[in-house]
Image: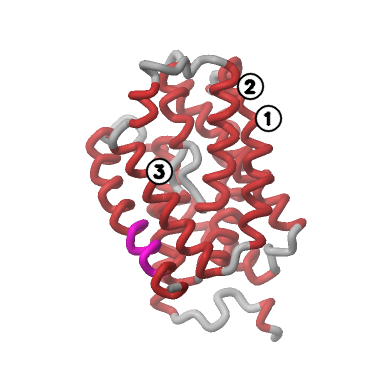
């Protein structure tokens, strides 16, 4: 059988198991909070699959999961908040996908590590929240700009783009369920547009599609359990611990890319 038709060709069994566990954990987070699944998956699987393979695979699996999550988002999203952000995000995703397809693996590894480090540090020190003292995040120009940056950075780094919007969404959305639903709609659009552009660029092969199919039981189980645990998780403590783990992994990834390049 041709290598491009064999799922996980040349990858050892233990690494495949790690990829499966990474997707389960990532989609548990998405099921619980409506976003945040891609970043931990990318940071774990890039070491095992390489940056391009890891990102394309998570885009395909995340796209499939949207069929389960999007109905929830459609029912509960805060649509007056959601609609103005969609255009900016589409532009950002389009430009980010073009950059992603042009970068070599080592440069992409370095850039992913650096961007994710920046995202986690900004989130940890609440940089955007401090900016609310001098910038009106509710202004249309500001929200559109944040949406564009979210799509651009999230596409290049493989995940984490919605961290640029979460402060705005917390201010703009009237309820917790509205915030979660809006996150689901925006992350769903983000993923689906990326999938279409990656297919068009020739990055989604039959082997990747089969790999995603093999991972779907873990993806769906993680999403279902996360949804069930939505009200039971102490989100503040959970994300505080997750930030430290993501920061360490992102710095390690950047160092790896820099070491190979320089």
Identify residue for label 2: 84
What quarter of the picture does the C terminus occupy?
bottom left
What quarter of the picture does the N terminus occupy?
bottom right
- Identify whether 36 is placed above or below 113: above
Q: Is residue 138 left or right of residue 25?
A: right
Identify residue for label 1: 87
The quadrant where residue 145 appears: top right
Separation of residues labelled 1 and 2 (CA atoms): 7 Å
- Identify whether 105 is placed above or below 43: below
Q: Identify the main secondary structure in magenta.
A: helix
Picture coordinates of residue 168 (x, y %)? 46, 23
Asked if the stretch drawn in magenta spans residue 7, the answer is no
Q: Secondary structure at mark 3?
A: helix
Picture coordinates of residue 92 (x, y %)? 63, 40
State which tag comes first along the sequence, 3 or 2. Answer: 2
Q: Residue at (77%, 56%) from the top-left corner?
A: 200
Identify residue for label 3: 119
């Amino acid at each position: 059988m041709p290598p491009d038709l064999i799922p996980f060709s040349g990858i050892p069994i233990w690494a495949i198991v790690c990829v499966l566990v990474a997707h389960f954990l990532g989609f548990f987070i998405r099921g619980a909070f409506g976003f945040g699944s891609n970043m931990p998956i990318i940071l774990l699987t890039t070491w095992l699959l390489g940056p391009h393979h890891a990102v394309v695979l998570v885009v395909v699996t995340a796209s499939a999961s949207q069929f389960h999550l999007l109905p929830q988002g459609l029912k509960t999203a805060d649509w007056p908040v959601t609609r103005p952000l969609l255009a900016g995000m589409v532009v950002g995703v389009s430009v980010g996908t073009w950059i992603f397809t042009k970068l070599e693996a080592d440069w992409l590894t370095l850039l992913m590590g650096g961007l994710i480090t920046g995202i986690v540090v900004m989130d940890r020190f609440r940089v955007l929240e401090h900016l609310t003292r001098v910038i009106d995040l509710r202004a249309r120009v500001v929200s559109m700009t944040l949406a564009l940056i979210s799509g651009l950075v999230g596409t290049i780094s493989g995940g984490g783009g919605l961290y640029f919007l979460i402060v705005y969404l917390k201010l703009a959305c009237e309820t917790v369920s509205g915030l979660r639903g809006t996150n689901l709609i925006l992350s769903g659009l983000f993923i689906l547009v990326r999938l279409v552009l990656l297919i068009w660029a020739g990055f989604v092969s039959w082997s990747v599609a089969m790999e995603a199919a093999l991972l779907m039981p873990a993806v769906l189980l993680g999403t279902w359990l996360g949804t069930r645990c939505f009200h039971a998780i102490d989100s503040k403590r959970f994300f505080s611990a997750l930030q430290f783990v993501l920061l360490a992994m992102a710095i390690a990834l950047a160092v790896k890319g820099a070491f190979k390049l320089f």
